[in-house]
Amino acid sequence: MNAQKATVKGVVADGDLPVPFANIYLKGTEKGTATDEDGNYSIHSLQPGKYVLIASAIGYETFRTSFLVGKDEVVSLNIELTASAEALDEMVVTGTLKAVNRLESAVPVEVYSPTFLKKNPTPSIFEALQNVNGVRPQINCNVCNTGDIHINGLEGPYTLVLIDGMPIVSGLGTVYGLSGIPNSLIDQIEIVKGPASTLYGSEAVGGLINIITKSTLEAPKIFADVFATGWGEYNLDVGAKAALGKKVDMLLGVNYFKYDQLIDNNGDNFTDLTLQDRISVFQKWNFKRDNSKLFTLAGRFFYEDRWGGELQWTPEFRGGDEIYGESIYTRRWEVLGQYELPFEEKMLLSFSYNDHNQNSVYGNTPYLADQRIGFGQLTWDKTLGKHDLLFGSAVRYNYYDDDTAATANLRGNEADEVFIPSLFVQDEYKFAEKHSVLAGLRYDYDSRHGNIFTPRAAYRWKIGNHDIFRANFGTGFRVVNLFTEDHAALTGARDVIITEALNPERSTNINLNYLKKIYADNGTFISIDASAFYTNFSNQILPDYDTDPNQIIYDNLDGKSVSQGISANIETVLPNGLRFLVGATYQDVSQTENGVTTQQILTERFTGTWNVSYAIRSLDLSIDYTGNLYGPMRLPLISDLDPRSEFSPTWSIQNIQFTYKGLPNFEFYGGVKNLLNWTPNRGNPFIIARANDPFDNNVQFDNNGDVVATPNNPFALTFDPSYVYGPNQGIRGFFGMRYTVF
């Protein structure tokens, strides 16, 4: 018995602060414990020998070390933990344009770390967002598979996408700009649901997504992530950082994606998945200045060649009317930076510029477009007593030109070019120990529409150390660029009708949010984040597919459009390594015009997401089971005789992944995507209308331009690939490897 009296003990701390309820165990044994409130731990009755101790705690990187213990020896082993990117007290900047603790922010901000993205590896941020509650990547075209991001049921144009706080992914670029950002370079993704135009201007009407890249100080020295799927998709992320002298650090990341397999599992002679060849190169520079003043500069170049269509299509048919194909060449570059002015006051200059060139053909319809967006912003962060003030001025330059009716006028084609200067102010006032209010106002001047004011207000009540209640009122506006690639207008036979001069869209939103975090004595952690939201739109512009099946009619809504619902996320972490993140949203998105209320097209009533993870510590193996569930949504039929379902079924995409971390610097992962092998052709006679006649050569029209039902066309249809609500990709395996050196 004397040989079993050895002990290891110590203190687990974060700097000078103890870490309570951290999990401590000895690898390969059943010995383990948890720290007390003062961070102390001890494990008794050890056999002499060598052990590997592993310490883990919510919000910290896992700690590993080995030690030797002799007979009756007491080993003192103190542990210093390092905060991880998943720390519970995340710093967020998106809600208020200031770096604040998430719990202290008056605006609710959801934060997703690189660890979240790794639980279901994807080649683009667009796909990665499928497991975020209340956020849905919407594929808009069955042939070219491009899409946008819906937040709380609102269409993609109402979501502003930022990179490092700069609005460089918008308009035309939203369709493609979320591809090619190396996931290995992402520090965190911040999501704000509800209007944010007071700080970010046009397009932040329904919400925004801010993709924050790693700083050169925090990024690994070398990283590589490569994976392949059973469908023949290949994705590579590689990068490195380097010090260029004592004053400059540089971070380089390259993403390459390739898919070139012709797969037609639904038998319509069209590719189920668009073929893609894409490369993206990202660089970020950090310049060290006196007094730790900030100066960063980043740039990205993106090129993609994608096509989808009839299986026999080759580039020689591009733009012709023999074999149907949608071929898209995209070239864009971006530059962005931040420079803190050399004053005692906290003044930050932010700037970005992007150039997006699009060379596309949809069958024999060309779509050639250029978009340039320049943005500059100066903010002054000032604290006066209990007032936390922010003053800002911004200017935005928009240039857009294409070969459609969007830029046509009496003088012919003419580019849309405009400067929009802005002023904004924000004041957060802490009027009591647990209570604070935030008020903000933005003024924009658009030469086409005049003066635009967008106020907002927020109230925060810190009920306890881990209980927060927030109430937010906000307004938003969007100056509409009509097309920026409307596939229904470009790929079908419908005529585009613009009935009036289109005014800016406006929105008013109320959001109530409650956040609670529970820490149990045994190390269990539970987080509850619940919200209720209501958004009312005026002047909303939505394409009308219903009035005339041969037309798309654009005008300002003469009535109202409402998005309302409730949403909740529950996260649970157990001491045994089991983690749950479950979310659900119920929403009602509708338009009312002339006393008639209709459900918004391609908008689900309810969604659910889940992420279940379990770590088998003795095997260095983790298991991730992720998925989503979508309720029925109304779909765009194109004739009264259209035999396809008017509403989608309730459908789900589910995935499982196994990750092995037993080798230093390496991770090996693999699994199965779309376990249920679900595709949208289930229960439908076809997905693409008239796939056998994509140029409508055998479609007959009457004198009014309406399609006539014939033996060859019994359902009176024209070619149309816009009946799409989910991916055509079925079940597939995947395998990958990560290599990281810090």
Image (cartoon, rainbow, N blue to C red):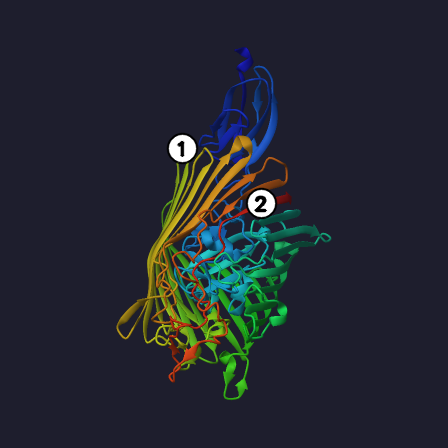
The x and y percentages for residue 137 are: 46, 59
Graded by Cα atoms within 10 Å as few (under 14), some (14 to 19) or many (20 or more), the crowding at tag 2 reads: some
Which numbered disc covers residue 735?
2
Query: Looking at the rendering, which quadrant does residue 520 occupy?
Result: top left
Q: Residue furthest bottom?
A: 410
Q: Disc 1, disc 2: CB below 8 Å?
A: no
| Nearer to the camera, 409 or 509 | 409
In the rendered view, tell whether residue 278 sits above or below residue 625. below
Q: Point out residue 544 in the picture as x, y percentages from the top left corner.
A: 38, 73
Report which residue position mark 1 lands on. 521
Question: Under tag 1, what secondary structure?
Answer: loop
Q: Nearest to the eye among marks 1 and 2: give it.
A: 2
Disc 1 from disc 2: Cα separation: 39 Å
Q: Nearer the viewer, residue 225 or 478?
A: 225
> Identity of the amino acid at label 1?
Asp
- Counting from the top left corner in percent of width and height, residue 345 is at 55, 61
Residue 615 appears in the rendering: yes
Q: Residue furthest left?
A: 595
Quarter of the figure with residue 196: bottom left
